[in-house]
Amino acid sequence: MNEQKLPHGARILVVRLSAIGDVLHSTAVVHNLKRLVPDCHVTWLVSPPASILLENNPDIDRLLVWDRRTFDKAAAHLDLRTVRQTLKEAAALLHQYEFDIALDIQGLFLSGILTRMSRAPRRIGIHERHEGNFLFMTEMAPDIPERHKIRRYMTALAPLGIGPEDFEPGLVLKLPDTYEEFAEKFFADKAVTLHDPQRPLLLVNTRTTWPDKNWPPEFFGRALANLPENIQIVFTGAPSDQVYIERAQQEMAGRASLSIAGQTSLLELAAIFRESDLLLTGDTGPLYIAEAVGLPTLSLWGPTHPGIYGPLTKGHHFILSPNKCTACCKTKCRRRTNACMNAIKPGTVTKALLGLLYH
């Protein structure tokens, strides 16, 4: 750690509004900050639904929740009256407190506005691809060649004397004590057993928020169809995922499985993850929830790359598309083919799952 450039008891605002995976990535920044400078006071400005993942975080002294979804909807419809009103509400929330330093680790024009509203005399931004954010900062963190998002987020701490050599990987998601026995009780009525080496529990998340990050549900079914019957297969997801889960199950040739899509909250899902054996998923929020609670994962990658977004801790395995068109980081395939994800073969995934479940 370089010479500390923080006043005693510094009041620090962190601005990272969304999304689930990115908010969890950012917990690594705050954890390292608190680990190295324990007397600082950290306030975090966040938006639902990711906010629930921070409510019990031991590294956060104060959590401020502002719902950006109302702002985003109004901005998309050019509803300037609502845009102004939501920003006024954010300003009123921030102006209740005083901050010495604000760290914008989102890098958006919107997060820049909110950071400026904090009235912190020092406002530190990071180098991301979004334009205009720097206009609201008093200083910018150093740019680095490193691609991984967490390491790039960590540069926000460099002006405070915390360098890359100080970084310890790991995400933070602390569940309330009330979730201690949730998974056991939840699965008791579903004839799913936990912690049985003879009946490992494989969770499967079939969908992501980006259309081109989705592996075809039929491919999921074909990959799972050939797994031994003693492996318990449970599909997770949102209610809207059920139709894709059913398509996967149709390809499983009668192989037993269970869907709990839409039956859990984010924290309940995290509690289930904590007691399971392996998660199969794409690059999406549940991957990082799994990392945060210690569930090993096998993730499938096409338009994004594990070297940019993947877990940095042990126990996580990646299958990267063999297609030469990968890591475009586009939310929709420009060629409208999703060729990168389609190039991952079900047999490849089956083999990897067997290796991980029977290592």
Image (spheres, rainbow, N blue to C red):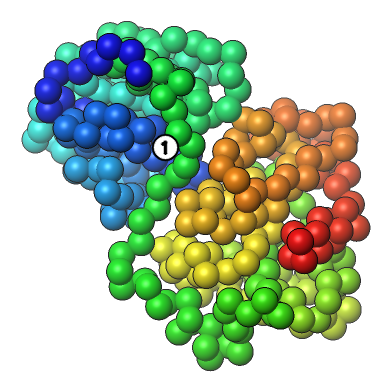
Q: Quadrant of residue 201?
A: bottom right
Q: Does any portion of residue 244 appear in the rendered image?
A: yes
Question: Is label 1 in a helix, a strand or a loop?
Answer: helix
Q: Residue at x 60, y 35 (%)?
A: 309
Q: Quadrant of residue 65?
A: top left
What quarter of the picture does the C terminus occupy? Answer: bottom right
Q: Residue at x 27, y 11 (%)?
A: 3
Q: Is residue 61 left or right of residue 19?
A: left
Q: Is residue 292 above or below residue 41?
A: below
Q: Is residue 163 left or right of residue 216?
A: left
Other residues around mark 1 within 10 Å, as few (<14) / some (14–19) / many (≥20): many
Residue 83 at x, y percent in the picture: 31, 33
Q: Residue at x 53, y 13 (%)?
A: 144
Q: Does any portion of residue 269 appear in the rendered image?
A: no
Q: Name the foreground residue: 354 vs 335.
A: 354
Residue 100 at x, y percent in the picture: 15, 21
Residue 120 at x, y percent in the picture: 18, 19
Q: Is residue 156 above or below residue 295?
A: above
Tag 1 residue: 28
Q: Is residue 208 above or below residue 242?
A: above
Q: Name the foreground residue: 42 vs 295.
A: 295
Q: Is residue 216 above or below residue 252?
A: above
What quarter of the picture does the N terminus occupy? Answer: top left
Residue 11 at x, y percent in the picture: 16, 28
Q: Name the foreground residue: 359 vs 119.
A: 359
